[in-house]
Image (cartoon, rainbow, N blue to C red):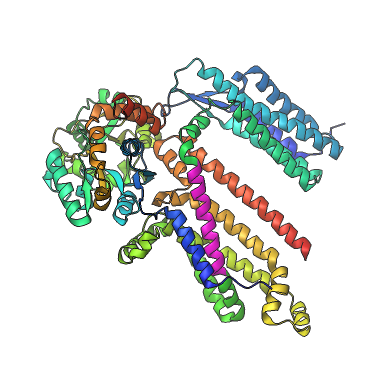
Amino acid sequence: MRRPPTLSRRSLLTGALWLSLSGKGGAASPVIVGSKLDLEGALLGHMALLALRRAGIETQNRLQIGPTAILREALLSGAIDLCVEYTGNAAFFFHQDDDPVWKDAEAGYARAAELDYRRNSLVWLRPAPADNSWAIAVPNRLAREKSLATLEDFARFARDGNRIKLAASAEFVESAAGLPAFETAYGFKLEARQLLVLSGGETSATMKAAADGMSGVNAAMAYGADGALEALDLLALEDPRHAEPVYAPAPVVRAATLELYPNIRQALAPVFASLDLATLRDLNEKVAVEGEAAAAVALAFLGAKGLLD
Amino acid sequence: MTPIVHNRVLLALCLVGALAALYGEFLNSAPNRLAGSVALPLWQAPLLEAAAAMAGLGALTVLAFAAQVKLRSYATLLVAVLVLWASLSGAGHFATLLSSASPPAARYSLGATFWTLVAVALLAMLDAVQRMKLALALRVGLVAALCFGFVLMAQAGRFADLSLAKEFSSHRAIFFSELGRHLALVGAAIFFALCMGVPLTALVLRKAKACGVVFASLGIVQTIPSIALFGVLIAPLSALSRDLPFLRDLGVGGTGPAPAIIALTLYSLLPLVRSFYTGLAEVAEDVKDAAIGMGFGARNLFFAVELPLGLPALLSGLRVATIQAIGLAAVAALIGAGGLGAFVFQGVGEYALDLVLVGAIPIILLALAADFIFQMLIASARRRI
């Protein structure tokens, strides 16, 4: 006659399941590298993985685990040890959206590094010299017809009551550093019916919508470093009044992990230093438009720069 | 004299297939992953395969008028396999031809005509197999042969230039680990649902008053939208993992597998408990009385009488719960738990619909496989009663 499973056996099974799922345990635990769900996250994440492995550090790939909030939660809870974050997002994390310090690249980085180290024991390493901030992009055809080159023109276009339908992510529409920042700086306001809100943060979908005029969309949320702008015949409107904070990608690592592996700093510094806006845009284009695998593009780039020798 | 239609299903399928072949697009060609595509109809596909597909459809239409069941069914099987081969090989061959004259960024994705022809062929096969009441072993053999044929074509590089294959190969490195994560999520959820469901069923069986409360609460949980439940669990779990470090070491946190498994377990409970309860409650009273009269104790009664008689219903509930969990686990990718849903959400975000298929097709196949396995188990449990 079978005996029902005892509690001890059940708890052993439970423990085994958790351990196998979390993949932790052991003295020399690998550095778990996470990234955002989008393509640039995958690209920069793979670069970080390759650079760390080159430096002889054992890594675990947990790239593309979710949007900004999920990645932040995973980093804070220790589910991942290292990720690539944007300096401007620190304004969002620490509720200092209105502070003008974020508009300066160096000062913003210093503030982010100081706050996160003091409060969360997270170390921000040197960022890349690229400002991948939010932008509003319009089809080139519309830009030519209505003479739109900067956000000032766009604001005038909106105030004059022209038909606008902006496709954007929920993060962009709600974050004080996103659409509200543009609206305040340039003096226009888009109503709910003029917005098409998508739940994810990907600009490929929003830009494709604007390029094809889907659902009447004629403007899209885009990033400064987006690879598909040229391919989709879109123009990213300039931001002369600097409404946006600087979003420079930087590796963020838990202090405990950095103590265990201090050569993380030297491993990642040259990689990020070589990523300026034009380079980043070019790499993004290869992944988003030409459809090459992010890992392959990262490998080719680092190889070409001699960073894998 | 008007010809009599002996197989209306087959005729209807052929009609749908013909409409798709005439008006749909077989392949969609785009200059890169994001740009808009140009539709390419079936008759522009390579001659051999296009002709085979059209001829196959014509043959199936004729077969719909054939009277003899067995002969017609075997013929339908053969012709349907021909149509299937023509669609698959035709799509792959077409993509290869086009890509030899285009830059590497060009993308060729499968269009509505392709999917319709494949569906028509598979449904015609299913219909034929059911009408001729093919033995189980032969059915399994047929499925195995089709899969083997598909794998052979894939290994030969037939499909290499289709954008679906390109998306798969560029994500191949993580595909199998995400598949493993998906299965682990489903497995863990069903395991915990069983651990919780068995005592809950026992409670509901012994105390009739608990019945209302238990089923009402499980029903309410079932109505909560899955994304909402996943999201709602993040905050309390992160707070818990911050306060209790041993949980963090076990890998329990606000994001990751913990909230996903908890939510999946809760969703699996209702189908499980409901069918466990129904299965055990419907074991005939006189059978139980006879057993008690023969001197069976309570534990013996459960394991030797109630459980075997209620097993088909138990397995039925497990089948529903497993299939549901396989589908729901796709949403877990949104909260960092990984799984095949990761490809679905990446694809939606990147506007690469073939990447969505890289996630969705395995989920569908997993659900079909689970359904098949459980149906076998239920059938064998029924035979043993």
Residue B270 part of the magenta segment: no
Foreground residue, B23 or B154? B154
Residue B217 at x, y percent in the picture: 50, 70
Quarter holding the C terminus of chain A? top left
Question: From the viewer's perspective, is B283 left or right of B352?
Answer: right
Question: From the viewer's perspective, is A175 left or right of B377?
Answer: left
What kind of secondary structure does the magenta stretch mostly adopt? Answer: helix
Quarter holding the N terminus of chain A? bottom right
Among the 4 quarters of the image, the one containing residue A35 = top left
Question: From the viewer's perspective, is B276 left or right of B243?
Answer: right
Foreground residue, A94 or B337? B337
Q: Residue furthest top?
A: B101
Residue A82 at x, y percent in the picture: 30, 46
Residue A103 at x, y percent in the picture: 14, 40
Report the span colored magenta. B176-197
Q: Relative to A287, does residue B241 appear above or below in the rendering? A: below
Among the 4 quarters of the image, the one containing residue A160 = top left
Residue B194 part of the magenta segment: yes
The answer to whether residue A229 is seen in the rendering is: no
Residue A53 at x, y percent in the picture: 34, 38
Residue at point 65% right, 70% down? B278
Q: Relative to B298, does residue A91 appear above or below in the rendering? A: above
The answer to whether residue B96 is seen in the rendering is: yes
Foreground residue, A192 or A175? A175
Residue at point 14% right, 32% down? A240
Residue at point 69% right, 29% down? B83
